[in-house]
Image (spheres, helix red, strand yellow):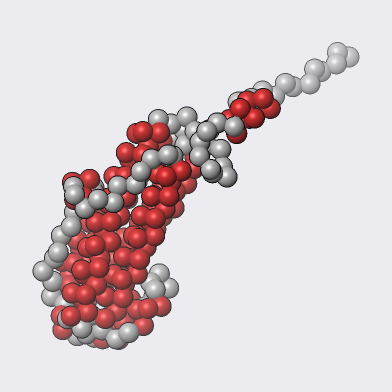
């Protein structure tokens, strides 16, 4: 009987770099960093994209801070707490983006000059509690779309930057879900403090939202 030749399984994984190549990369003058970034993406374009994202996060942080105090002024303490929590997240995102820009030997642009023009999202004040929540939801949707596009364009060229963007994207999606919940509850709320408080204090929201809220300020 004729022997059956073993099946040859080909691997599509690219060959690993030679030891000499790894040594050369590690000795490149890339600054005092613990990591060696062998990314193939155009660093200038990546830095420009990250600076646009940084501007977006800063504008969103400023908008959330204004809305926090305006919500508190109409007695919506729990909504104010939600806005405050989102503002803190946006500042943390800005730190992540700025840190990655520096790792790529770039300079994070925190200048207020042209901040609104660099941002993908807008700074809209809103004239009611519902409009403030809606404007924040729109901004989060814009951020989600822009992060999706940036991640798609990066592909596998820069996995480190991709992970940073994916982390921020996931948080932006959670923000959007929280805001959708607030909009639904405000529409259904007819002066019921307990109903709105229960929704804002759901597991998807922060413990800081344990404070009471009045629907009198809601449109």
The residue closer to the viewer here, 77 or 26, is 26
Whether residue 214 is situated above or below residue 177 in the rendered picture:
below
Which residue is farthest left? Answer: 127
Residue 208 visible in image: yes
Residue drawn at point x = 40 percent, y = 44 percent:
101
Residue drawn at point x = 15 percent, y = 60 percent:
124
Task: Give x and y (percent) for residue 103.
Answer: 46, 43
The residue closer to the viewer here, 199 or 113, is 113
Residue drawn at point x = 22 percent, y = 63 percent:
63
Whether residue 212 is situated above or below residue 99 in the rendered picture:
below
Which residue is farthest top? Answer: 2
The residue closer to the viewer here, 196 or 20, is 20
Task: Give x and y (percent) for residue 135.
Answer: 19, 61
Q: Is residue 88 left or right of residue 21?
A: left
Residue drawn at point x = 28 percent, y = 66 percent:
179
**Quarter assignment of residue 217:** bottom left
Q: Is residue 212 left or right of residue 71?
A: right
Residue 184 visible in image: no
Task: Give x and y (percent) for residue 171.
Answer: 39, 58
Task: Give x and y (percent) for residue 152.
Answer: 39, 37
Whether residue 90 is situated above or below residue 158 in the rendered picture:
below
How many numbered dots are placed on residues in this image? Answer: 0
The C terminus lies in quadrant: bottom left
The residue closer to the viewer here, 107 or 116, is 107
Whether residue 182 is situated above or below residue 124 in the rendered picture:
below
Which residue is farthest right? Answer: 1
**Quarter assignment of residue 65:** bottom left
The N terminus lies in quadrant: top right
């Amino acid at each position: 009987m004729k022997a059956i030749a073993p099946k040859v399984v080909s691997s599509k994984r690219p060959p690993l770099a030679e030891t000499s190549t790894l040594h050369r990369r590690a000795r490149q003058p890339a600054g005092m960093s613990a990591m060696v970034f062998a990314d193939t993406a155009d660093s200038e374009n990546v830095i420009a994209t990250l600076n646009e994202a940084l501007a977006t996060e800063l504008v969103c942080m400023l908008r959330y801070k204004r809305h926090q105090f305006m919500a508190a002024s109409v007695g919506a303490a729990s909504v104010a707490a939600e806005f405050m929590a989102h503002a803190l997240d946006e500042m943390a995102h800005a730190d992540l983006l700025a840190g990655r820009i520096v790792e790529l030997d770039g300079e994070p642009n925190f200048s207020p000059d042209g901040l609104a023009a660099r941002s993908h999202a807008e700074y809209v004040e809103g004239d009611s509690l519902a409009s403030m929540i809606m404007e924040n939801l729109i901004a989060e949707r814009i951020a989600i779309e822009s992060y999706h596009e940036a991640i798609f364009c990066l592909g596998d060229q820069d996995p480190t930057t991709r992970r940073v963007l994916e982390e921020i994207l996931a948080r932006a999606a959670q923000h959007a879900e929280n805001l959708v919940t607030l909009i639904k509850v405000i529409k259904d709320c007819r002066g019921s403090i307990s109903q709105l408080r229960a929704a804002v204090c759901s597991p998807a929201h922060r413990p800081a939202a344990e404070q009471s809220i009045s629907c009198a300020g809601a449109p």
